[in-house]
Image: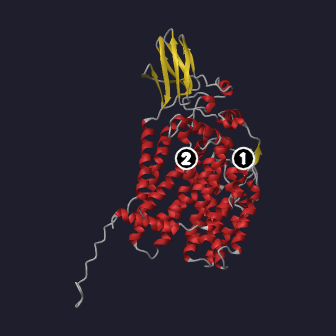
């Protein structure tokens, strides 16, 4: 049989094996409806970063419309001066939002749709992960509890953190890819883990930093358990596959990581890590993990936070029960091993959020960029849901039927215990939320959040362009700061602007946009040098006397282009590994046996 025929046969076998509908999986997805139903109405709502999601979506959409497949520049930040926000903010969740914009939805509706999709995507990943060890009933319990654990709801209805919410939805898939890589090392598992890990970096780099040690320890723990009594050859294959998976993930992530690392020197990084963003002011206290408190306020230094950091009563009880069952040997050896690894990691995550872990945070400087140790509650949500799956499997084994009463009880309890947390702080529809004006409203309200660069001597508090934005007119970017000249702006497209300069003498023209690597200018078709100018570090260029056409455009630097190309190649490699034809030496054709005596030849 040829390789192509073998591939067709294998694909047909897989399709036949998977074509039956898993009704408990459908039920698990359906039960998430109470978590995301509040998003279906026309009302807006108030959350910490709700407006962030909106103006990021507006800026991202504008850059995509201008022809940038991988946007780097947010043209309207800093009161219209622009900021390299997408160099430092992982943009993958915004592609999800953009897909709904292409479907004809508005900004607010597209962001809501992205949240709903995140709920379903995460639930599907948790079901597939938990089913590996705990069967369909255990997977149902894990899926529903994962959806309704308090921090999962905090992330959307209190924080409104789009990228982090999607990262939490991504976590089960990453753990699933890690388990597959260790249990069945091979090309497809390497491709799966590399895609999952690299994708998480593009989705939310801070979550990737936090989850990396936990996924790594999870894989090591599973490797130890799976290698006991096995061959060293198989164990070695798993190690090699693990190295390959991590390497492929970093390869895919390089398009985001490399520009991020290179260009940090151009921004004021302390702006995003100082004051209330310092990790040592954001630790969680043990009582907060167990407190039923729910609030819509902000996290502050000390235990008097205005938002909840609770694990949830159902999560606590099921996690303790799972560990108790494992110690009593009431679970199978495989299930007990998973419970032991996840329980250990759960305790580690809880410790890492408390003040007791401060020396560790100080010893690992990259962790300080995470800002909030309590982001680890996302890891806690995944691990707690896995442990709940073990309880569901144990309950189902003691009863008959595909949906035993004990499983129904656990599922309903998981929903009802958190149902009151699914009610956001509603707000009436605001037309400004559909436009860039939502960004300026935010910057006026929080002037400390206005981005500025290393070339700026002051942080902007306003801009002469605001009146033009408010009137729905294109912002006028040019003004003459030296010499005698008139400037007529011809076209403005956010990441590109054109003008005609009529200079009576040699002149200097200022552009009300931050000077940043990637901005280039052409005078009558010839590239000219740019430089920072003024207290805010705007772009400036010189023109000789006469009439001239000027074009400015934000472009990718060589490092950005190389990094983006490397990511593209990494994705292609992952696809080839995942969908490649079966390899290996072809079996020799069987040798015809000699005819028996008396038989016909």
Query: How many circles with numbers are drawn on the protein?
Result: 2
Q: Which mark is residue 142?
A: none
The answer to which image quadrant residue 479 occupies is: top right
Residue 158 image position (x, y, % from top left): 71, 49
Residue 231 image position (x, y, % from top left): 40, 74
Looking at the rendering, in which quadrant would you find the C terminus? bottom left
The answer to which image quadrant residue 427 occupies is: top right
31 and 595: which is toward the camera = 595
Which residue lies most toward the bottom here?
A: 598
Looking at the rendering, in which quadrant would you find the N terminus? bottom left
Of tags 1 and 2, the one toward the viewer is: 2
Q: Which residue is mark 2?
A: 92
Q: In the rendered view, does 35 fall on the left or right side of 96?
A: right
Q: Does residue 82 lie above or below 235 as drawn? A: above
* SS at mark 1 in the image: loop
Observer able to see residue 459: no
598 and 453: which is toward the camera = 598
Q: Which mark is residue 298?
A: 1
Residue 47 image position (x, y, % from top left): 71, 45
Q: In the rendered view, does 439 fall on the left or right side of 455?
A: right
Q: Could you give the CA–CA distance between mark 1 and mark 2, rounded to whole angstroms?
A: 26 Å
* Residue at 60 percent of width and 77 percent of height: 331
Q: Report crowding for label 2: few under 14, some 14 to 19, many 20 or more residues within 10 A (C-alpha).
A: some
* Residue at 61 percent of width and 50 percent of height: 164
Q: Does residue 238 lie above or below 358 as drawn? A: below
* Residue at 46 percent of width and 51 percent of height: 250
* SS at mark 2 in the image: helix
Q: Are marks 1 and 2 in contact (CB under 8 Å)?
A: no
Observer able to see residue 571: yes
Residue 50 image position (x, y, % from top left): 68, 44
Q: Report crowding for label 1: few under 14, some 14 to 19, many 20 or more residues within 10 A (C-alpha).
A: some
């Amino acid at each position: 049989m040829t390789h192509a025929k073998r591939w067709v046969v294998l694909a047909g076998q897989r399709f036949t094996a998977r074509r039956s509908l898993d009704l408990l999986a459908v039920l698990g997805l359906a039960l998430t409806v109470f978590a995301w139903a509040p998003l279906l109405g026309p009302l807006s709502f108030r959350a910490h970063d709700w407006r962030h999601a909106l103006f990021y979506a507006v800026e991202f959409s504008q850059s995509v419309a201008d022809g940038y497949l991988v946007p780097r520049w947010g043209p309207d930040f800093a009161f219209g001066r622009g900021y390299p926000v997408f160099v430092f903010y992982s943009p993958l969740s915004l592609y999800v939002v953009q897909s709904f914009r292409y479907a004809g939805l508005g900004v607010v509706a597209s962001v809501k749709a992205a949240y709903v999709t995140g709920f379903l995507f995460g639930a599907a990943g948790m079901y597939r992960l938990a089913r590996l060890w705990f069967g369909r009933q255990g997977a149902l319990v894990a899926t529903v509890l994962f959806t309704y654990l308090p921090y999962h709801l905090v992330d959307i209805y209190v924080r409104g953190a789009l990228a982090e919410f999607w990262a939490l939805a991504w976590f089960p898939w990453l753990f699933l890819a890690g388990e597959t890589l260790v249990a069945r090392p091979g090309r497809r598992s390497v491709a799966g883990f590399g895609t999952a890990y690299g994708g998480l970096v593009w989705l939310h780099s801070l979550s990737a930093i936090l989850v990396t040690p936990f996924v790594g320890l999870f894989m090591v723990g599973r490797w130890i358990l799976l290698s006991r009594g096995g061959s060293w050859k198989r164990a070695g294959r798993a190690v090699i596959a693990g190295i390959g998976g991590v390497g492929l993930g970093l390869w895919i992530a390089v398009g985001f990581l490399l520009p991020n690392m290179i260009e940090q020197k151009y921004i004021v990084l302390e702006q995003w890590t100082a004051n209330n963003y310092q990790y040592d002011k954001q630790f969680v206290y043990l009582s907060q993990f167990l407190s039923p408190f729910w609030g819509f306020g902000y996290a502050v230094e000390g235990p008097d936070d205005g938002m909840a950091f609770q694990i949830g009563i159902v999560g606590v009880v099921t996690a303790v029960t799972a560990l108790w069952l494992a110690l009593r040997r009431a679970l199978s050896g495989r299930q007990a091993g998973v419970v032991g690894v996840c329980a250990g990691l759960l305790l580690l995550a809880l410790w890492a959020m408390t003040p007791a872990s401060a020396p560790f945070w100080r010893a690992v400087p990259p962790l300080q960029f995470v800002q909030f140790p309590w982001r680890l509650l996302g890891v806690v949500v995944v691990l707690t849901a896995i442990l709940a799956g073990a309880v569901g499997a144990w309950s189902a084994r003691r009863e008959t039927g595909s949906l035993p009463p004990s499983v129904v009880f656990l599922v309903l309890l998981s929903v009802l215990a958190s149902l009151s947390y699914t009610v956001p702080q509603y707000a009436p529809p605001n037309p400004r939320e559909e436009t860039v004006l939502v960004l300026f409203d935010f910057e006026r309200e929080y002037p400390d959040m206005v981005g500025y660069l290393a070339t700026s001597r002051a942080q902007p508090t306003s801009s002469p362009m605001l009146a033009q934005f408010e009137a729905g007119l294109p912002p006028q970017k040019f003004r003459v700061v030296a010499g005698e000249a008139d400037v007529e702006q011809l076209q403005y497209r956010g990441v590109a602007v054109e003008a005609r300069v009529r200079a009576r003498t040699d002149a200097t023209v200022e552009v009300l946009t931050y000077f940043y690597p990637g901005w280039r200018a052409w005078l009558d078709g010839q590239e000219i040098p740019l430089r920072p100018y003024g207290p805010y570090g705007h772009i400036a260029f010189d023109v000789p006397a006469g009439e001239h056409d000027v074009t400015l455009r934000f472009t990718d630097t060589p490092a950005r282009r190389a990094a983006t190309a490397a990511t593209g190649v990494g994705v292609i490699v992952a696809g080839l590994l995942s969908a490649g034809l079966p390899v290996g030496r072809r079996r020799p054709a069987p040798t015809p046996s000699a005819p028996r005596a008396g038989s016909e030849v």
